Image (tube, helix red, strand yellow):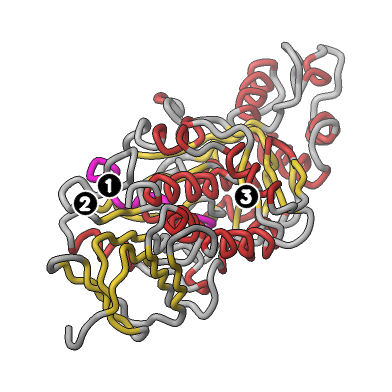
Amino acid sequence: MHGDPRKFDVVVLGAGAAGLMCAAVAVQRGRSVALLDHNAQPGRKILISGGGRCNFTNIHCAPDRFLSANPHFAKSALALYEPQHFLELVDRYRIPWHEKTLGQLFCDHSARAILDMLLAECAVGTGTFELLLNARGIKVANSGGFCVSSSAGELKADALVVATGGLSIPKMGATGLGYELARQFGLRVIEPRPALVPLILGGDEARWTELAGVSTEVVATAGGGKKGARGNPQFREKMLVTHRGLSGPAVLQTSAYWQAGQPFVVNFAPGLAGGAKLLESLMDPKARRDETALKQALRAVLPQRMADHLAEAGASGGWSNAALEKLEKRLRAWEFHPVGTEGFEKAEVTAGGVNTDDLNARTMEARRVPGLFFIGEAVGVTGHLGGFNFQWAWASGVAAGRAV
């Protein structure tokens, strides 16, 4: 590096949810903070989230709603900064909000209110704040402090916070910079993969795509066979058939746990109470038993096109009691065999990332590199769909902001 770099207490890389929250907390603690982003505007993913209304947290936040190689890692940060804390901030700025299903909280109006709130928080306190956008070609060296060079100039700080996100939605500017910096400083990176992402069907199962646009409530889980889906949660939500495969909340949720080669298992009758059966009407010895009767039975609980498709696929087993019992079981644990996902382009988040074993769970600081922090989506913690990933961004941002 040449010339005299500008000096700050903290440089934060990435002006997304986690980076903005971290910067705000640090400024309010009296720190001088420079926040860099290679995009032309901050908070781009905040603005598009929740259909433009930002699903900013979930009131049912708990550690078991997060996927990580170390299931205990997220507990400290999540306990330090809970959904109620963020909600108090939202209320202080008089941002109207509402609760949707399953504890999801959204803005009544535009997600921009959340971004404006975070930027306003960065201007509060005894510290100083500078936002540097269009910062291209970011490089970092560690020599008597962290030296950061980019098209925005040269900066130096005792603390560097990496909040550069994951690889999901590259059209919004996602890059692998955070992983590159982690490796540069000797931290391990768990291979990033798309999560909360639609699944693609191929082979004979590609016929399902003829039902594109049809949705129904199911219980979905990843895994199957003799080992079952041990350790993988079940999700009771809507499944949507698309022109390429399967999507909808149930599928997106389960995709975070699905691995190539595994089946994707669906119960098509989650709403039947007690010992009720899908095929009850066919089990009477006097009942008509053929494909038409099967379609009628399935139409009682499923959309017509989906009922007919399942009837055609399941009718080949015959009409004996044993065959109908076998079909009943299959409909409650129907195995799909996805050939892949729709990739980072359609993934809402990135699973994997900086290995949590290399970070302090209370502060997000690298164990072997004092002053270096990783927060948000760059870290190997992935929340369920429904506001949990924003809560992780806020919580990990606060943890680092209080430590820098």
Q: Which numbered disc covers residue 188?
A: 2
| 355 in the magenta segment | yes
The answer to whether residue 101 of the structure is visible from this angle is yes
* Pointer 1 with pointer 2, Cβ within 8 A: yes
Q: Dot 2: what SS?
A: loop
Please tell me how crowded label 2 is: few (under 14), some (14-19), or many (20+) other residues with Cα within 10 Å: some
Q: Earlier in the sequence, mark 3 or mark 2?
A: 3
Name the residue rendered at 54%, 49% in the picture.
390
Q: Earlier in the sequence, mark 1 or mark 3?
A: 3
Q: How many marks?
A: 3
Does residue 357 appear left or right of residue 331 in this picture? Answer: left
Residue 215 on image: x %, y %: 74, 46
Q: Dot 1: what SS?
A: loop
Which residue is more in the foreground, 358 or 343? 358
Q: Amino acid at mark 1?
A: Asn
Q: Which residue in the protein does label 1 denote? A: 355
Between label 3 and label 2, give the one nearer the viewer.
3
Q: Which numbered disc covers residue 56?
A: 3
Does residue 206 appear left or right of residue 4 in this picture? Answer: right
Residue at mark 1 to residue at mark 2: CA–CA distance: 5 Å
Q: Point out the stretch of residues depicted in magenta.
A: 348-359
Name the residue rendered at 74%, 52% in the picture.
94
- Please tell me in which quadrant of the rendered image residue 34 appears: bottom left
Q: Amino acid at mark 3?
A: Phe
Outermost front residue: 126
Quadrant of the rendering where the N terminus is positioned: bottom left
